[in-house]
Amino acid sequence: MEQAPEFVTVTFASPPEEPEDAFLSRTRELALDLREIGPVDFVPAVSAPGAKSAGEIVAGVLAIAATANPDYAQAVVQTVVAFLRRNENRRASLKVGDIELHIDQPTRDEVARIIDAMQTALDSPAAGRRRR
């Protein structure tokens, strides 16, 4: 029996002009939003190669516990889309196993397709997920 992935990771980038404290604030904002769906872990931030300082962050990564709830994919995607709409000029990626979905400012139809793709990824044996 294949092991279900424990987390869906959500990654988003910092615009080059954004101060680190503002970026960390946005990361906390998204984590609070996602906590309404399930437990969230912070994943160590990624620094840019050749960054001016070791603490120069270019991407925030959050991991939210995956569940078999049929509304889970929709809740995660809609939460990330709402975050992106509040914080323009950002892109996010959702990763389930080896499957990665990229989001920026999607239309309603694109949101529906992203939800379907994430649900498929959650259910896919390639992602290591089986519905119970």
Image (cartoon, helix red, strand yellow):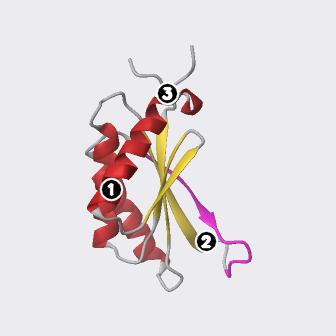
Residue stretch in magenta: 40-52
Badge number at residue 103: none
Looking at the image, which residue is at 57% across and 71% down?
Answer: 58
Percent position of residue 60, x then y: 50, 62
Q: Which residue is mark 2?
A: 55
* Location of residue 44 with respect to 120 vertically, above or below: below
3 vs 1, front mark: 1
Disc sitting over residue 129 in the figure? 3
The quarter in which the N terminus is drawn is top right
Residue occupying image coordinates x 37% and y 60%: 28
Q: Residue furthest right?
A: 50
Q: Residue at x 50, y 73 (%)?
A: 14
| Residue bearing mark 1 | 111
Q: Earlier in the sequence, mark 2 or mark 3?
A: 2
| Crowd band around label 2 with a 10 angstrom C-alpha radius: few (<14), some (14–19), many (20+) | few
Q: Identify the secondary structure beneath mark 3.
A: loop
Whether the magenta-drawn stretch holds residue 50 is answered as yes
Question: Which numbered mark, 2 or 3, is in the foreground of this view?
Answer: 3
For the C terminus, the quadrant is: top left
Mark 3 and mark 1 lie on one chain; the one further toward the N terminus is 1
Which kind of residue does numbered mark 3 sit on? Arg
Describe residue 72's horizontal placement relative to residue 97 as left or right: left
- Residue 38 in the image: state x and y as whole percent: 32, 39
Q: Position of residue 86 (x, y in %)?
A: 28, 71
Identify residue type, mark 1: Val
Kindly tell me whether residue 40 is visible in this rendering: no
Which comes before the other along the chain, label 1 or label 2?
2
**What is the C-alpha distance between the residues marked 3 and 1?**
22 Å
- The reply to whether callout 1 and callout 2 are in contact (CB within 8 Å) is no
Outermost residue toward the front in this view: 109
Q: Is residue 24 above or below residue 3?
A: below
Query: Image height check: is 79 above or below 130?
Result: below
